Structures are given as structure tokens and as C-alpha cells.
Image (tube, coloured by chain):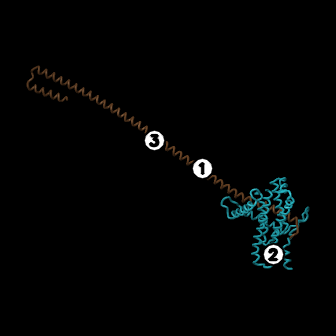
Amino acid sequence: MLNISPTTMVFTIINLLILFFILRKFLFKPINNIIAKREEEMKAAEEEIRKREEETIDLKAQLDEQLANIEDEKTAILADTNAKAAIEYDKIVNAAKDEAAVIIDDATKKAIIEQERVKKAAEGQIADIVVQATEKMLAGTVSEEENRELYEKFLNKAGGSQ
Amino acid sequence: MHLAEELNAQLIVDTLFVFDVPVIGDLTISESIFISWIIILAVLILCLIFTHNLKVHNPGKRQLAAEAAVTWIQNLIKDMLGEEAIEYTEYLMAVLIYIGLANTIGLFGMKPPTKDLNITIALAVMSIIVVQVAGIRKKRVGGWLKSFTQPVAIVTPLNIMELAIKPLSLCMRLFGNVIGAFVIMEIIKIVVPIGIPVVFSAYFDIFDGLLQAYVFVFLTSIYIKEAIE
């Protein structure tokens, strides 16, 4: 119990060192490695989630911006289109008005010409009839009946030409 | 006297083998060394069983138990040592496991190796070597030598005496506790062989045994902390 044995002491120190190395190599290292690995993975996963979150926030901002841009663009295009449409409308209406004016003018002119022509023709015919009637009356060879006939013919012709 | 003879027989550290080594001479392998070998072998086998097929994902119950145990002991010792001396954690874990197992091996009917004074002397010597190495590594040789004269020059002899006192107190405390517990357990076993020893064994082998392992490691960690301050 109390006898001092250097051999036992030396062996104990060796034993302790052997136990230390065994525990380190076969227990502490593998276990700590696996825990460290797990922690690393968790950290990586966390980092990944954080990154994704940031990306999502960025994307959302981008989309919001795009949406705002689209709204602006829409307003601009709408305004532009409205302006263009108004111009086009005015153009078409003005063109139509001009055309109508030309047509009306044309028609008026044509009517005047026609009227002139009819007037002239009637005047010519009346002159002829008057000339004929005068010739026949002057010849005196015309009976009462012929006279009446002539008269009626004249009237008919004058009325028909109207 | 019958009882005294029986007790004495139990207290003697048997010599198991004597090897005749050419240069050194006779190598006496004592019982306590042999039981230490059994402890080392058991630890090795348990380590291999518990760390077999470790997985990062979905660890089994066996692995979780091993992880929990290692983490628990590690944190226990890290807390004692503090951030500065964290590199000595693994050594102290080994000491804690060795003394813990050596003290409780009485449960398996073996004589605890720590009731052999030579074993506790060796453990205490190792502790004080580690403490001094920690001091030298931290302060270099000059700083380490200077630390003997601190806080005042007059305490230098006391500080040098502490080199012997600290390990002596470590080894005597452990040895005294274990041999005391062992003697009481042996007496109880001789007087009442059935039933009662189990109850007392729970205190003397398990509680006191683990407590002494803890105390030994705790004091060593305090000495290390002191040395690197």
C-alpha cells in the first residue's frame, strides 16, 4: 500500500499519456469534428437563407421599381396616344369638312351651269317658236284653226321645255 | 485477528508479473497498473463503439449520447480553465476520465488503482509538470522564473516549496479518500456481505470517487490558471 515503486509511477505516467492519446484520437477528435461539421453546415444553411432573403428583398425592390416604371410608361403612352388621336381626329374631320365644302361648291357650280344651259336652250326654243309663228302669221295663209293649233303647240312646247 | 488479516490482505497491492528486462532490470507490474490497462482497454473499446459510423445528419442515439457526454465534460473543464488555458482541456478530460473510472472500478469488483499511492503520486507529478509547462509556455523561461518572486521577493521560498506542496496535496487527498473509502467498503463487506454494501458503495465508490476525480482536475485547472496569469 505504501511501498514506493518507481516502475508503477513510470507506468502510470505512460498509461495516462496513452489514455490521453486514445481519447484524443478516438473520442474527442471525431466527436468534435462531427459537431464542428454540423455547426458549419448550419452556418452555411443560415448564410444561404440570409442570402436568399436579401435576394428576395432586392428582387421585390426591383419589381416595385419596374411596376412604378410601367405605371409611368402607361400614363405616358396613354397621353401620347390621346394627343395623337386628337390630332388624327382633327385631321380627318378637317379633311372631311374640306371635301364636303369642295363637293358642295362643285355641286353648286354644276347646278348653276345646268341652270344656265337649260335657260339658254329654252331661250333658243322660244326664239325659234316666235320666229316660226311670226313667219306663219306674216304669210297670212294661216286659218283660224291653224292659228289656234299653232298657239297651243307653242304653249305646249314652252310648257314642255320648262 | 481475523478481520485485520483479511483487511490487510485486501490492502496489499499485489505484484502480478515480473519482467526481466535486460538493461533496466526487473520490471514489476503491479495490480494497479494491470487494472489501469484494463481501464485503458475498456476506454478504447468504448471509444471505438461510440464513435463508429458518426453521422453529421440524423445521428443515432448512441452518437447523441457520446456527443452529449463529450460536450458536457468538455464544457465542464473549459469553464474551469477559462479562455486562456483552453488548450489543456483535452489533457484534463483524460485525467478526469481516468481517475473517475479508476475510483469507480470497485463497482466491478476490482481494486481501485488510485488506492495505490504510486499511482496518485504519478498523477500529481504529471499535473505539476503540466502546470509548470503551461507557465513556461505562457511566460517563457525568464517570466516563469520571475513568477516565483511574485508578488514579493520574500515569498520566493514559499513559492518554490509550493512546487512540492501542490502535487503532494493533490496525491495525498486522492489517495487518502480512495483508501479510506476502500477500507470502509471492505469492512462493510466483511461484516455484512449482502445488501448493505450496495447502499454504501453508491456513496463511496460512485459519489466520492467521482467527486475526488472532479476535485483533482479542478485543483489542477486552478494551478494552471494561476501559472499563466
Q: Colour of chain A?
A: brown
Residue A106 lies, with reference to residue B75, above or below; the image says above
- Viewer-proximal residue, A5 or A22? A5
Residue B208, horizontal then vertical, whole percent: 77, 70
Q: Residue at x 41, y 38 (%)?
A: A86
Residue A140, horizontal then vertical, whole percent: 9, 20
Q: For mark 3, what is the residue?
A: A78
Q: What whole-number distance in Å separates the C-alpha atoms at marks 2 and 3?
A: 104 Å
Of mark 3 and mark 1, the one earlier in the sequence is 1
Total count of labels: 3
Chain identifier of the cyan chain:
B
SS under mark 1: helix
Amino acid type at circle 2 is Glu
Q: For mark 2, what is the residue?
A: B186
The chain letter under disc 1 is A
The chain letter under disc 3 is A
What mark, if any, has residue A54 been given in the picture? 1
Q: What whole-number distance in Å separates the C-alpha atoms at marks 1 and 2?
A: 70 Å
